[in-house]
Image (cartoon, rainbow, N blue to C red):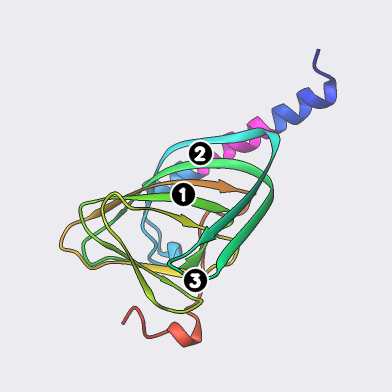
Amino acid sequence: MMSGKSKGRRWCAGAFASTLAIAALLMTSVPSQADHGLPHPELLGHGTFLDDIGINLRNKVFGQQTHVVQMNGASDLYVLRITIEAGGIAPWHNHDGVGFLVNTGPGILTNYVGEDCMPRLFYPGDAFIDPGHGELHAVRNDSSEDIVILATFVATGGPPVIPEPAPEHCGHVLD
C-alpha cells in the first residue's frame, strides 16, 4: 500500500516530467535565437526516475588519465536524435548530466574538449561518453552530409544543454 506522501511525490514527479517533456518538445520544434546556435534535437523519449539513481562512471579517454564522474540524484532520462548539418557547428557548451552517444553517420564528427582543445574524431558507428558536469566541448561536422547522433542523457533536473563561452586557450578552434 502506497502512503499519501509517496503518492504525492509520484504525482509531483509525473507533473514535473510532463512539464519538462512539453517544454522540450516546444523547444525542439521552434527555432530560437536563444539557443546560441546549438542543433535542435528531436526528443524521442523522456522519463523521470521514480527511484533514487546514482551513477559512478570511469572513462579512459584516448590514452589520457581516467575521468571519474559521480552523479547522485539523477532525476530524468532523455533519448534524443541530434542532427548536425553538413558544415554545422554546435558551439561550446556542457550538459547537466552524463550522455551516452553514438554517431550513426554518415559523416565524421569532430569533438573538441576544452581541457586540451584537441580534436577527437568519431566515425559512423562509434559510441562515446559525454561526462557533462562542466566539461566544455564543441562539435563540428566537417563532412558534406548531415550527421545524426543518437543520445541518451541522464540528468539531475538542470537544463540538458548549457551554452558556454569558448575557453580562452581554445577560442581559435572553431574558426
Q: Residue at x 54, y 67 (%)?
A: 135
Q: Quadrant of the C terminus?
A: bottom left
Q: Residues within 10 Å of mark 2 (few under 14, many from 20)?
A: few
Report the Cα–Cα distance between label 3 and label 1: 19 Å
Check the picture and name the quadrant holding the N terminus.
Answer: top right
Left or right of 14 in this view: 174? left
Q: Secondary structure at mark 2?
A: helix
What residue appears at the point 40 percent right and 59 percent down from the top-left corner?
A: 32
Judged left or right of residue 152, residue 54 is: right
User: 158 or 74: which is nearer to us?
Assistant: 74
Q: Which marked residue is nearer to the observer: mark 2 or mark 1?
A: 1
Of pointers 3 and 1, the one earlier in the residue sequence: 3
The answer to whether residue 91 is visible is no
Which SS class for mark 3? loop
How many circles with numbers are drawn on the protein?
3
Crowd band around label 1 with a 10 angstrom C-alpha radius: few (<14), some (14–19), many (20+): some
* Label of residue 22 in the image: 2
Is residue 16 covered in magenta? yes
The magenta region covers: 13-23
Q: Is the residue under label 2 in contact with that under label 3 (CB below 8 Å)?
A: no
Q: Where is residue 153? Give x, y as percent.
A: 51, 47
Question: Badge 3 is on which residue?
Answer: 64
Residue 174 inside the magenta-drawn segment: no
What residue sits 79% from the left and 25% below the top? Answer: 6
Q: Give the label on residue 10, or none.
A: none
Q: Marks 3/2: CA distance? A: 40 Å
* Secondary structure category for the residue under label 1: strand
Q: Label 1 belongs to which residue?
A: 100
Residue at the image point whose x is 45% and y is 69% from the top: 63
